[in-house]
Image (tube, helix red, strand yellow):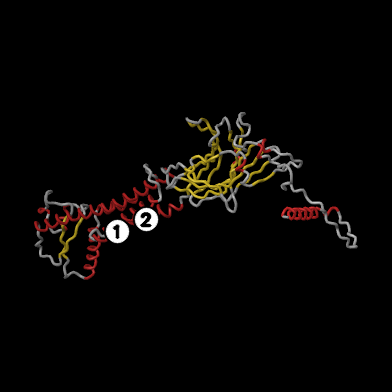
Amino acid sequence: MPDFTRLILFLFCLTALVESRKPKRRRWTGQLEMAKPSHLFKKNLDVTKIRKGKPQPLLRVEDHDFSMRPAFGGPAIPVGVDVQVESLDSISEVDMDFTMTLYLRHYWKDERLAFPSTSNKSMTFDGRLVKKIWVPDVFFVHSKRSFTHDTTTDNIMLRVYPDGHVLYSMRITVTAMCNMDFSHFPLDSQTCSLELESYAYTDEDLMLYWKNGDESLRTDEKVSLSQFLIQEFHTTSRLAFYSSTGWYNRLYINFTLRRHIFFFLLQTYFPATLMVMLSWVSFWIDRRAVPARVSLGITTVLTMSTIITGVNASMPRVSYIKAVDIYLWVSFVFVFLSVLEYAAVNYLTTVQERKERKLREKFPCMCGMLHSRTMMLDGSYSESEANSLAGYPRSHILTEEERQDKIVVHLALSSESNSSRKKGLLKGHMGLRIFQNTHAIDKYSRLIFPASYIFFNLIYWSVFS
């Protein structure tokens, strides 16, 4: 009985399967369908559509081994390069490097990528195809950091022509080393270079060259820097040798930068010059005003030290002297000498007053003159005039051992003289007092210091500018 039941179920299932395979008959609706135009059903041929059966891709990437360079075993494959500089972002003196954003393009021919085309049109791809085919392994020599931009997608373009020519372009930002010479800083010009080279393929396998000579390097018109004037961009090429691997083609992007001086004039040179000129003010201050002259000298010295420290903080620690160092340190020496000048004046004044005190004790004045005044006269007066003016007769002329550089003279202003004579004598006394308080070193310093500093500036700017 169970076998009979299984037979009935099998026949039922077989009948249902046969009925499901029969074509369904179209039900007659009694209406005639209108014929549609044939061009409405005609569609553009989509070459990217994968049809059933064996696919026929235009680029037969899977049929070749792209781990090998084109024409492997034959002559070196030529790879042309051109560059468009988008921006020169920064120049760092401390790190001695520069940052540049550029479009790097490679041109070569790979017959493995050739495809049939009646219109001779190229095909453009993004970065996904780059991972499946052979591309030149160009890298930046002496680069510190570099990356390919990826916003909003990888900035990579691959264009393939029917005859197998390939254009490979990418947008890169690279930070590379630049050997700078700061011996003329900040009146200097710097020449930096960005170097391109194949990492694995020697000149026997890959020949790098500038595709259009000097026209292979183009720059954006808006490329500029705040501290530098871009004077020149040019290209060169040469061979580089490595003892362990051989000779390689190397391409150079050279550019020359000249530093703007106006910023450093305002921030360094003018303040230093003003501090030197301010130190000269002490030569016109009374030599007995010790607090004024000492505080002025210390202030100018400390200010110059601050300027020197600020300039060196933004510079690399080089082992040679820079042009700005010469100017600042010479200015510092002038300021420091003005402090030493007052130290010499103060010392000589103290010695002179001590000698005068001894002379007064040795030759007291007992002439009975009223309202005696004491003043100092320079050696421009003759010995006889000084003695007669002081009330000493010619027989009382001092000997050479007793006579000093300054002569003490006692003047008597009689109270019985008229008021007009009294005013004239007081004016003469005030002029002689000013003359007394001005030391000879101060008088010479008023001329020597400015003249020497002006002479130094003439030589400095004629040499370094």
- Up the image or down, 58 lies above or below 369; here it is above
The C terminus: image quadrant:
top left
Is 71 on the left-hand or right-hand side of 305?
A: right
Identify the mark at residue 56; answer none if there is no mark: none
Secondary-structure class at tag 1: helix
Pick whichever, 313 or 308, lies toward us: 313
Is there a contact, CB below 8 Å, between mark 1 and mark 2?
Answer: no
Pick whichever, 280 or 211, lies toward us: 211
- Hey, what amino acid is under mark 2? Leu
Mark 1 to mark 2 CA distance (whole Å): 13 Å
- Up the image or down, 137 lies above or below 269; here it is above
Q: Residue furthest top?
A: 74
- Answer with the quarter of the image where residue 282 lies: bottom left
- Answer with the quarter of the image where residue 286 lies: bottom left
Identify the mark at residue 274; answer none if there is no mark: 2
Is 203 on the left-hand or right-hand side of 48?
A: left
The number of callouts visible is 2
* Residue 439: image location, x then y, percent: 24, 55
* Residue 86: image location, x then y, percent: 57, 48
* Residue 349: image location, x then y, percent: 20, 55
Is 386 on the left-hand or right-hand side of 73?
A: left
Q: Residues within 10 Å of mark 1 (few under 14, many from 20)?
A: some
Is 215 on the left-hand or right-hand side of 324?
A: right
Question: Can you identify the residue that label 1 sits on?
Answer: 296
- Up the image or down, 68 lies above or below 1; here it is above
The N terminus: image quadrant:
bottom right
